[in-house]
Amino acid sequence: MTGAKMENPDLTTSVGVLKFKNPVITASGTFGYGLEYEDLLVLNELGGIVVKGISLKPKSGNPPQRIIETPCGMLNAIGLANIGLENFLKDKLPLLKRYSTVRIVNIYGHSVEEYKSLAESFSGIDGVDALEVNISCPNVSEGGMVFGVDPILTARVTEAVKKNTDKFVIVKLSPNVTNIQTIARAAEDSGADAVSLINTLTGMAIDIKRRTPVLANIIGGLSGPAIRPIALYLVHKVVSTVSIPVIGMGGIMKASDALEFLIAGAKAVQVGTANFVNPQATIEIIEGIREYCRSYNIPKVEDLIGTLSLPESP
């Protein structure tokens, strides 16, 4: 630290054409439709909100048990339960539009046609600033394969969404792949405006008394601080691979965690599991980033992004 603290660092940041008042966004599936947190924090202070995944029709999700705490994290197999496109547009979006934060809708489908239909449905809709395309869903039309592990399928979905919407398109990447850089390039080459990563890691838990899986779905998605080093590494790799903006996520619980992702090159971060532990986590992270910029005399948070200094190769 040098000199006196800066009074009012500028926390605004851009992800392509999206302008955020700060780089902290809530992650899909952990913040409901945003409205559930109205009484717990000031939504207008957030950089952005990503609502839980929306499908064409309502979906009840997986049977219980659907969630379990794990060391330094949690496993969930919610099954992407949601109220469906029509109900979201009628009941949730009008209320969400009252807030001056960036509104991002996460979408998912089980075929390219479903993704295309969702993209078309959101085109021209006021109050939706971007679509985040979840490509970590089972692709029923392709024999159960997951879109996000195959660069060809990733490209097909990305292209279908991009060609059928006027929204900014973010493709959310799965870490459950051999080479995430290949998937990221496929998304970029097919028109994605940005990528976000990482989604959850696949895991499971066993009830040793009953000798059965704890989750009714057997497997679930691992999130929380346990995955943060992996997420940070993969964000670093993707930042060095693509020219489009990268949004980082995975186990961010406090400001120092978020700062690591920004220094690694992420233009913004998403906060997920931390919302369950502390509903005020996002606000505290924003203030922590502000205090860091003050302490280190960084006038704009964008001056911090991508400043990672790597050792020279021997």
Image (cartoon, rainbow, N blue to C red):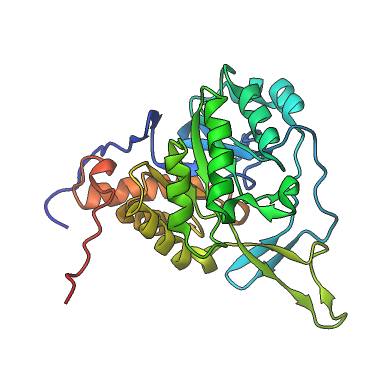
> Residue at coordinates 47% horizontally, 38% vertically from top-left?
190
Direction from residue 59 to residue 295 in the image, left or right: left
Judge whether 211 appears above or below 265 on screen: below
Residue at image x 16%, y 70%? 312
Which percent across, then down, holds residue 104? 54, 33
Q: Residue 16, percent across and down?
A: 37, 33
Q: Quadrant of the C terminus?
A: bottom left
At x 84% / y 76%, what residue is drawn?
A: 212
- Drawn side of residue 59 relative to residue 39, left or right: right
The quadrant in which residue 191 appears is top left
Q: Is residue 23 left or right of residue 298?
A: right
Residue at far right of view? 210
| Image-based side of 184 in relation to 72, left or right | left
Locate residue 106, reporting x and y percent. Answer: 60, 38
Q: Is residue 127 above or below residue 260?
A: above
Please say whether residue 170 is visible from this viewpoint. Answer: yes
The quarter of the image holding the N terminus is bottom left
Q: Position of residue 187 (x, y in %)?
A: 48, 44
Q: Nearer the viewer, residue 34 or 127?
A: 127
Relative depth, front residue between 288 and 144 = 144
Which residue lies most toward the left here?
Answer: 3
From the viewer's perspective, is residue 151 above or below residue 97? below
- Decide which of 82, 224 is in the foreground and name it: 82
Residue depicted at 64% across the width and 30% down the height: 116
Say how many tags the image has: 0
Q: Would you say residue 104 is visible in this rendering?
A: no
